[in-house]
Image (cartoon, coloured by chain):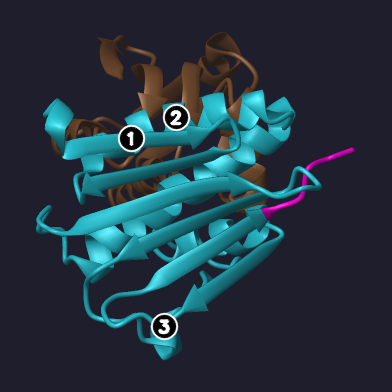
Chain colours: A cyan, B brown
Amino acid sequence: MREKDLNVRVVSNDEIHMSMRGLQALIKPIREKLEHFAQENGFDKQQIYEIKLAVNEALANIIKHAYKGDDVGDIEVSLETNGLGDLEIAIQDFAEKVDMAQLVSRDLDKAEDHGLGLYLINSLMDEVEYDLSQEKGTRLILKKKLNQ
Amino acid sequence: MSELVAKTEDATVITLQGELDVNNVDNLKSLIESELHEGTEKMLVDLKNVSYMDSAALGVLVSGLKRARLSNAQFKLANVTGNVENIFKLTRLTKFFDIYSSVDEAIDSF
């Protein structure tokens, strides 16, 4: 990993924008940024784990499926909390738009080694939206409510 | 992430340490495959010191389990706790694996 492959812009304590090349090696540093951000914004240990894992899975899916594992695409990740403290994460890729018909979670009654990521994203976050209105790529929006 | 392999007459024990994710899981996949290819009949993966695991890592353990079954080998896990236990429970994969609370207990079960 090269430092220049991950750019971080801190707008405030409750807003951060990151841009990265689609490299698997950058998933861990993104997880670490997320952990720090979520801690600073009052999320508990279990919620932080869930947020990190969901974003890990989303980034891995983009690199593997949207960018076909080529490690060449750009990805933008924005973290923001609203007035209630709830977290919204936007993950934008610039690949071919996701085909919603292909988004199938794993059958939990079978010991399958694929399709787990999508299932985890949907299980771990309170809301999951796919915004296909951008000129290019897909914007995945993940929301997590702050435990009071 | 680091892997340590210990071979005894009782079993082949793979001890993992650190964060296991999509970026480093290929090493573990190769290791499991090569051990099974060499004829290991009793394989144990110790997850005690794994602090984090994603679905790619879980997928490698699932494929290891399937590969072991094809070779009539036993494939067991020990010390599935904390964040590792979290992801196993979330994906309901605990029912497919033989999971033990310690390495000794797992080895005694072979």
Q: Residue at x 43, y 90 (%)?
A: A101
On the image, the x and y values in percent for residue A67 come to 18, 65
Where residue A33 is drawn, which disc sits there? Answer: 2
Where residue A136 is drawn, which disc sits there? Answer: none
B10 with respect to B47 (left or right): left
Label 1: few (<14), some (14–19) or many (≥20) C-alpha neighbours in 10 Å: some
Which one is nearer the viewer's eye here, A24 or B77?
Answer: A24
Q: CA distance from mark 2 to mark 3?
A: 26 Å
Marks 1 and 3 belong to one chain: yes
Amino acid at circle 3:
Leu
Q: For mark 3, give the secondary structure.
A: loop
Amino acid at circle 2:
Lys
Q: Which residue is mark 3?
A: A132
Q: Are marks 2 and 1 in contact (CB under 8 Å)?
A: yes
Q: CA distance from mark 2 to mark 1?
A: 9 Å
On the image, the x and y values in percent for residue B37 come to 15, 39
Which one is nearer the viewer's eye here, A143 or A115?
Answer: A143
Give the magenta part as a residue range: A144-148
Q: Which residue is mark 1?
A: A8
Above or below A67: residue B17:
above
